[in-house]
Structure formats: C-alpha cells, structure tokens
Image: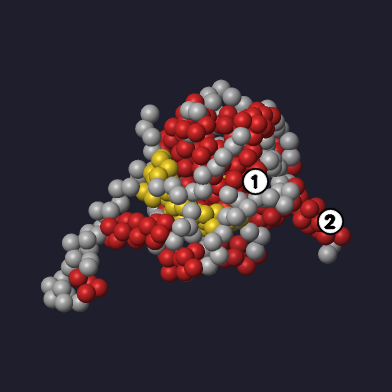
Amino acid sequence: MRQALRVTNSTLPPYSLSAAEQENIVTRMREWNESDYAGFRRVLIQGSDCYPDLAKIRTLADSHRKGASGKPIKDFVILGIGGSSLGAEAILRALHSPHQEPRFHIADNSDPAVFQWLLDGINPEQTLLFVVAKSGGTMETLSQFLVAQDWLQKACPQNGWKEHVVLCTDPQKGDLRALASRWKLDCLEVPSAVGGRFTALTSVGLFPAVFAGLPAEEFLAGAASVAAWEKQPWHENPCTQFAASLAKASAKHPITVLMPYSTQLSAFSRWFCQLWGESLGKDGLGLTPYPAVGATDQHSQMQLYMEGPKDKCLVFVHAKGTATLMPIPFPNGLSDLPSFALLQNRSVGGLLDAEFRATRDAVTQQRIPNCTLEIDRIDAYSLGALFYFCEVATALAGAVLGVNPFNQPGVEAAKILTKKYLAEGQ
C-alpha cells in the first residue's frame, strides 16, 4: 500500500495523556462509532451501510453526460452549502482544470445576483444540476433548485429537464428524498450515519469526481492508507499525535492555520476549516481554523503569524516533486540584475518549494508551533489520504477536548429562526 501522506518536521507542543484520559478517549470514540453520525469510518468498508455505491455513481454519470437534446454536458452546477459542496470543491479545484469541460460551478450561497449571473452565463441544454442536501431541507439549496428547475423546464420541452438533474440526499427521509420520488428524479444517497462535513468520500464528492473523469477507487485507497495507522500504538500513530497535540495545546494556541503550498489545495483548506471549526467549537471549547495558501499569504498574513500574538499553530501542506516544474527561461543580458540572477537555472516549482522551506524554518526559529503534512504528489490517492487524516484527527481532537465532534447545535438556532421568519413573511 502506497503511503502518500507523512507528518514531518513537527514542533507542535508535546502532549501528555494519563492512562485515565486515554481510557476516556477510547470510551468516547467507541460510543461515537456506534452512534448515528460517526459512520465516516465505515465509508472505507465494502459492504457496509456507508460504503459508496460506485456502480450507481458511474451509471448515473454516464447516463447524464448528455442532456435531453443529446448535446454533451458542458457545465456541472453543484447546488449545496457547507459539507454538501466543500468536499467536492476541494476535489475539483485540486484535480480538474477550470478550463476543461465540463466546467464545474459551486452555487453555495443564496445570493440572487451571483446565482443569476451563473444562470445567464450557461446553456441549460448543456447543464447538469447536482442538488445536495443531506437533511433534504436546506433552505438555501432548495430555493436555488426551484429557480434552476424553472430555468431548465423553460428550455427543455416536456419532462426533458429531468435529464439535467441528479439529487443527493438521505436514503429514506427528508423533503428532497420525497421530491425525488414524486418527480421521479435520479437520486444518490448520503449515508444516514455520515455527518455532512464528513461526506467528501461519499457520493457527495465522488459523483462530481467521476463526472470529471477522476478515479473514485483511488480516493478510497488513499484514505485506507491512513486508516491502516489505527493499528499502531497511540504514541506511534501520526494522526493521533497530531490531534492530541493540537487539542491539548488549545488553551495557549487556540488558532489552527492550515497553509497548503499549492493553489490546487486552497479549496481543501476551506473544507478543513468547516470540519475543524463546526466539529470542535462547542461548550466554550474548540480550535479556531483559519485558511491560508502559500506563497500568496506570505504577503498578507505572515507578518501577523511571525510577530503577532503567539496563539497559533501552523499546519503546512507540502507536495513533493514540484521543485523541477516549469523551468524559468533566462534571456541573455540579465545576469547583472540581482533579483533576476537568482532565477537563473531555476524553476517556478523550485521557487515555490524554496518559499515553503523558508517559511517553515522562519516560523520554527520564532518558536511558532508547526508541522507539515507532506504528500508525494497531488492526485486522487493523496487527496483521499488528506481527507481521511483530517476527519480522523477531528474526531480524536473532539475526544481529547471532551466535545462531541459529530453534532452542531450552535448552527440549528439560526436555521430555526430562518424558517420562522419565512413563515411570518418577514
């Protein structure tokens, strides 16, 4: 099994867990694994209630590559918010060129102006809508779906618009599931036992990935390479050490900055922020996530990290093998210009690699806790490993902090009020 992910150069604060604390953590994890929302581990177990139906995913992808008119799908629109879109976005931004068809669009906010711009700029006869809401009642997503369904129906005669829609929701319950039955729409399942922000490796993320031509099995295989660490003792498991160090240091270092040195992984950083923040921020406890991307944010955030409050742990993500990419041409007559001279016989990838190493070493010299998640390259296997590593680390960090990482009671209050205001016509 290829080990695509390593935790390297860690200067995170050492953790100390008593035997009683370790027993409490194991007890919490066991209870959660038997609960309704901790099924993300079973996503990797073939035949389980959470393992993705790859055959159905491929069948629906193949059957929807052309719309009702027979024209190929050029634009794939994801209607979803939070965990219903961030995992898919992380996959697509990392591995699918924005200039390659189909083009993927993430409609993750009920902003009418921007949504109208999107619909005005694409052809409904060559568009597929992927409507994702695990609960089946996410108001933002449902409102956009109704608008987009009307837009499709006007362009596609009779029931042809149905060839342009795939739903993704709970297997049995919820209004979106009921609508799928009522309107006879194709529908994929979000496993009931997998919380929304843990669904990147389910049909939520894998259907867009397969539609983009990416290998679904490779994501799961990469995740399995991290799952194999669970057989190791606590003190030898890199994921356990990572989670426990950050959780135990949360009082002094409550902010976790995830900083991949790759624009391809910038959306992964945003995915992590929802996972880490929504899972751990409870009962007055938690770790505040912050997204960054190198080298861009060396020029926007690094001053704060270096000389501001020492309340942050930095987690770098570094892809090996980029140092020789895109050699830099060097015209004659520039050697006397010092800034240009440094680029002679170098590459753009080499510059990015040097900036990563320089930033990591600089923050280490400033005694800012940090570590590096190192992957051998950016591909489906490595991305699957990163997803699963962060999911397991989040569950472990919750166990160390003593909070349930699988619920989100703080989010529900605003949802209830939103429905109240809509019902009142406000």
The spot of residue 327 in percent (x, y) is 22, 59
The residue type indicated by label 2 comes to Lys
**Measuring 71% from the left and 49% from the top, which residue is drawn there?**
282
Dot 2 lies on which element?
helix
- Which quarter of the picture shows residue 310? bottom right
Mark 2 or mark 1: which is in front?
1
Image quarter where the C terminus lies is bottom right
Q: Is residue 392 above or below residue 120?
A: above
Q: Residues within 10 Å of mark 2 (few under 14, many from 20)?
A: few
Mark toward the start of the polypeptide (2 vs 1):
1
Q: Nearer the viewer, residue 215 or 383?
A: 383
Question: Which residue has dot 2 on it?
Answer: 420
Image quarter where the N terminus lies is top left
Dot 1 lies on which element?
helix
**Measuring 19% from the left and 70% from the top, which residue is drawn there?**
341
**Measuring 44% from the left and 32% from the top, which residue is drawn there?**
225
- Left or right: 82 with respect to 373? right
Question: Which residue has dot 1 on it?
Answer: 279
Compute the Cα span from label 2 to label 1. 26 Å
Q: Nearer the viewer, residue 87 or 139?
A: 87
Q: Is residue 204 above or below residue 236?
A: below
Residue 413 appearing in the image: yes
The spot of residue 5 in percent (x, y) is 41, 40
The residue type indicated by label 1 comes to Ser
Q: Which mark is residue 216?
A: none
- Left or right: 149 with respect to 16? right
The spot of residue 370 in percent (x, y) is 46, 52
Q: Nearer the viewer, residue 400 or 320?
A: 400
- Which quarter of the picture shows residue 383? top left
- Left or right: 270 with respect to 262? right
Q: Are marks 2 and 1 in contact (CB under 8 Å)?
A: no
Q: Is residue 98 above or below residue 397?
A: below
